[in-house]
Amino acid sequence: MGLQPARVKNMLATETTQHFHSHKKRKEKEGGEKVGNLRSDRQPSTSYMKGPNESRSPEVGIRKLQFLSAKSLTRIGAWNVRTLYVTGSLAQVLREMRSYNLQILGVSKMKWTGSGRMESEGATILYSGGRLHERGVGIILGKEAARTKLSWEPISDRIITARIQTRFTKATIVEVYAPTNTAEDEERERTTTGVLDEIPGHDMKILMGDFNAQIGADRSGWEEVMGGMAKGERSDNGERLLDLCSSYRLKIGGSFFRHKDVHTLTWTSPE
């Protein structure tokens, strides 16, 4: 059973853009509604189908030779920011994104309502939320990554997808904010049901986000899915994540590389 796209709307932004004045004339030519010193689009694509001018985009034609190719380094991250519904929080995230030289950032728990697209400090923010400031997910594209964007789709306040053009193929990014282990089974199953099935088979699949899961260090029977560098004890959500990755031939990238504990363990349960 597939999930239906969420209704898209725009939300007023309070963040500031330092480079707005130098780019003002260019943005005015591009069109779109301006809110303060940000620009938001009212017609984001909600389909994997190409638009009439998609293949003719000169920027995509130039940048796809560099982005996500074997000869270049593309940095991708996924953060649970706890909230972006606070003045100055978006600017702080964008600063951190630049400091880590990230081109693509998946964001969980934004706590923004509605769905839409906006620009700030050269980055493109795609977001998908509900009616309340509770959950919400987003994908932030750096300047170079934004030029490769083909389409995007707000699924729910827990899932958002974006499709980009790479050197040899197209890639679909799925950002997920999964329920905790204490949530109802139906809610946990519904989070990813049908989303990966709707991605074109020839696309590169990048599944990321906060899965509220621990896969544990034991990789017996899961050698094709996980590496030997994972931490903790396997949880119920961890078992579900392993099953999901096995079904779609995905690998849990963070488990294949050695990291400091401070970079792998981000939260401790108070229980």
Image: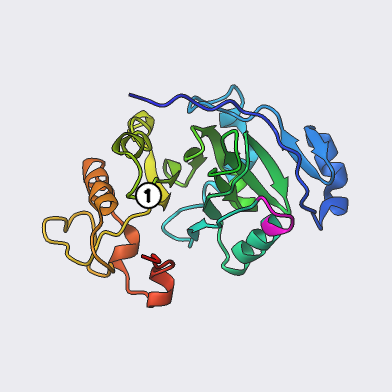
Q: What stretch is highlighted in magenta?
A: 85-89
What secondary structure prevails in the magenta region?
Answer: loop
Q: Residue furthest front?
A: 271
Residue lying furthest top in this view? 52
Residue farthest to the bottom, as pictured: 260
Look at 51% across and 38% down and name the residue there.
157
Q: Which residue is drawn at 69% across and 54% down?
A: 86
Q: What residue is drawn where x is 48% and y is 62%?
A: 73
Residue 256 seen in render: yes
Which of 44 and 203 lies nearest the eye of the viewer?
44
Give the image's coloring scheme: rainbow
10 vs 208, left or right, is: right
- Residue 189 quadrant: top left
Magenta span contains residue 62:
no
Residue picked out by circle 1: 180
Is disc 1 placed on a helix, strand or loop?
loop
| Residue 27 position (above or below residue 142) | above
Residue 125, picture quadrant: top right
Residue 249 is situated, as x and y percent measured from the top left of the image, at: 24, 45
Q: In this view, does 245 lie to the left or right of 199?
A: left
Count of marks overlaid on the render:
1
User: How far from the left and from the top, in percent, is residue 114?
Assistant: 62, 34
Amino acid on which the number 1 mark rests in the picture: Thr
Quadrant occupied by the C terminus? bottom left
